[in-house]
Amino acid sequence: MFKAQYASIASLGLLVFVVQPAAAVSYNLVKDYSGSTFFDEWVFYDHFDNLTNGDAVFVSASTAASSKLAFVDSGSGHAIVKVDNTSQVPSNEKRNTVRISTKDRYAVGSVWVADMFHVPFGCSVWPAWWSQAPDWPIGGEIDTFEGVNQVTHNQMGLHTTTGCNQVSPVQSSTLVNSTNCDHLADSNLGCIVTNPDAASYGQAFSAAGGGIFVTELASSGISYVPQGGLKHAFTE
């Protein structure tokens, strides 16, 4: 899923693993979301934000297209997902924006890759690139990219049912905010890792031309590799 106030996405890819005779694991591309057909395989939420109580209405595909809130830029080929930043919205009313999710679902043994060129930052925005099981919280939620309000670094996390905990990240310099993934603990904080790279989110991220984020969903655990190559691991 993807939710943003404004974002430019170069491409997204989904891969599944193939076990070779030598027992090495490789991945083959099974789905590509890019170019002029980027929005063809997405479901638009088409509802006000009834999940996090934000002051937002996630519009339909037709409204998003006619309002230029979701479109492919003809010059760059980037998919643009943005908020209505031209209308005057009266107090206590909600602003139009976009939340989309893929029509297809992907099981354990998959890798997904997001190439993001620009992502919003600053007060009141909440851009996120994440995945979740059909019956949340059963099956869990993986937050690969997320920033809220004034945070300056990307935060990655998991929200699960009781019993899942985060193991230590591969890089000891990574800031570990929480290790309990249980959605019932700490007001659903989840297990959270903050990327120490200043260019992982915010103004520095956009100034650097964005970045690529890779998430591996394997039976042994979940791994993230953001654009800087820093690897984070979560296991049950």
Image: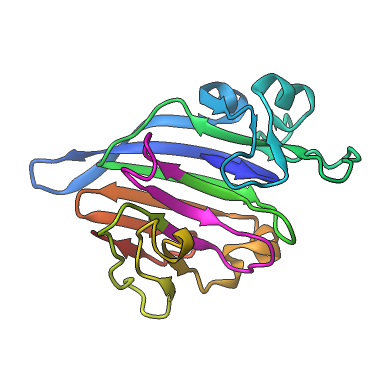
Coloration mode: rainbow
Whether residue 72 can be seen here: no
Q: Which residues are magenta?
A: 131-157
At 72% across and 45% down in the image, what residue appears?
55
Give the residue drawn at x 20%, y 54%.
220
Q: Quadrant of the C terminus?
A: bottom left
Asked if residue 35 shows in the view, the reply is yes
Residue 47 placement (x, y as % from top left): 64, 30
Query: Is 108 placed left or right of 45 in the picture?
Result: left
Q: Is residue 84 magenta?
A: no
How many marks the image carries: the answer is: 0
Looking at the image, residue 104 lies above or below residue 13: above
Q: Nearer the viewer, residue 44 or 26?
A: 44
**For the point 40% across and 48% down, which residue is it?**
141
In depth, the one of 139 and 51 nearer the eye is 51
Please give left or right for residue 168 compared with residue 79 in the image: left
Depth order, front residue of 74/159: 159
Q: Position of residue 222 (x, y in %)?
A: 31, 55
Q: Position of residue 150 (x, y in %)?
A: 69, 67
145 magenta-colored: yes
Relative to the observer, which residue lies in front, 228 or 133? 133
Query: Seen in the image, is 145 located left or right of residue 158?
Result: right
Above or below 220: residue 21? above
**In which quarter of the view is residue 174 placed?**
bottom left
Q: List the single residue furthest toward the bottom.
A: 173
160 displayed left or right of 122: left
Instruction: Give how far across and how far down residue 66 sits, in percent.
Output: 78, 22
Query: Considering only vertical position in the picture, is 77 above or below 162?
Result: above
